[in-house]
Image: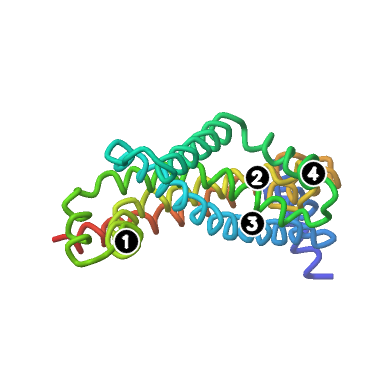
Amino acid sequence: MGNSMLAYRVSLALPAWLTNLKDQFYVNFIAEDRYMYLAKGLWMTLKITFFAVILGIALGVVAAIIRSTHDKTVADMRPGFGRFILKLLNLIVKLYLTVIRGTPVVVQLMITYYIIFASSTNQVLVAVLAFGINSGAYVAEIIRSGIMSIDNGQFEAGRSLGFNYIQTMTYIIIPQALKNVLPALANEFIVLVKETSVSGYVGIMDLTRGGDVIRSRTFVAFMPLLAVAGIYLIIVIFFSKMVSILERRLRNSER
């Protein structure tokens, strides 16, 4: 009886707006364990982002090697089958970059899910493919800029050691290029985290979708959307801090 009376007096002492926020917080997150929608959505967002980044880097490296090889060597190549294949691959990569970078990621996601993989029931795999292919187009240009920034003397050094072109790229050029563009790649990861917020368009319970489910249950938009925005902001701040630390260490290692 004494505790309930004390709680009643404390509630009377609280401003009305604060009491209202407290009630909204309870209804949106505590009641029926609704905070689990956000927790599960956050895990899904990070999982999709992680695998999409791996796929994007793999596609980006291949596309960047084709583009940079074409730019550096095609003018000196003799007409023949090898030159034709290189020009064809470069044309395919340029088409890929143009289409992916010129269309919205949400449209690409819906085309991938509803048209290309219409018979698939694995929504997460489809999302990883869609976001990975999208990220690969941007990663390709990042890595290509890193490769093109490497002095041609590095290629000549690799040849003088007896390496062929592929070995020179693998052991000498690519490691240096990745080191130069690592901060930009990390920023691409941050951008990709936010881009996955459209996963709900194909029914995936990501972080944004989790907040939307809470809103549909409580008919209150303020708290769920504010929570989703806050979580994304914390993720971005955390990884931005990691990127700044990485950039500082890379600068120190070059001294």
Residue 153 is situated, as x and y percent measured from the top left of the image, at 16, 52
Q: Amino acid at mark 3?
A: Ile
Residue 60 is situated, as x and y percent measured from the top left of the image, at 47, 49
Q: Amino acid at mark 4?
A: Arg
Residue depth check, mark 3 versus mark 4: number of the one nearer the observer: 3
Relative placement, left or right, of 159 versus 69 is left
Q: What residue sits 38% from the left and 55% below the top?
A: 243
Q: Which mark is residue 175?
A: 1
Q: Earlier in the sequence, mark 2 or mark 1?
A: 1
Q: CA distance from mark 2 to mark 4?
A: 16 Å
Residue placed under numbered mark 3 in the picture: 48
143 lies above or below 167:
above
Q: Earlier in the sequence, mark 2 or mark 4?
A: 2
Q: What residue sits 70% from the left and 46% below the top?
A: 199
Q: CA distance from mark 2 to mark 1?
A: 32 Å
Q: Which mark is residue 88?
A: none
Cβ atoms at labels 2 and 4 below 8 Å apart: no
Q: Earlier in the sequence, mark 3 or mark 4?
A: 3
Q: CA distance from mark 2 to mark 3?
A: 10 Å
Q: Amino acid at mark 2?
A: Ser
Residue depth check, mark 3 versus mark 1: number of the one nearer the observer: 1
Residue placed under numbered mark 2 in the picture: 197
Residue depth check, mark 2 versus mark 3: number of the one nearer the observer: 3
For label 1, count other residues whose C-alpha is less than 10 Å away and answer few (under 14), some (14-19) or many (20+): few
Q: Which mark is residue 215?
A: 4
Assign a secondary structure to mark 2: helix
Occupied quadrant, residue 176: bottom left
Q: What residue sits 25% from the left and 45% below the top?
A: 149
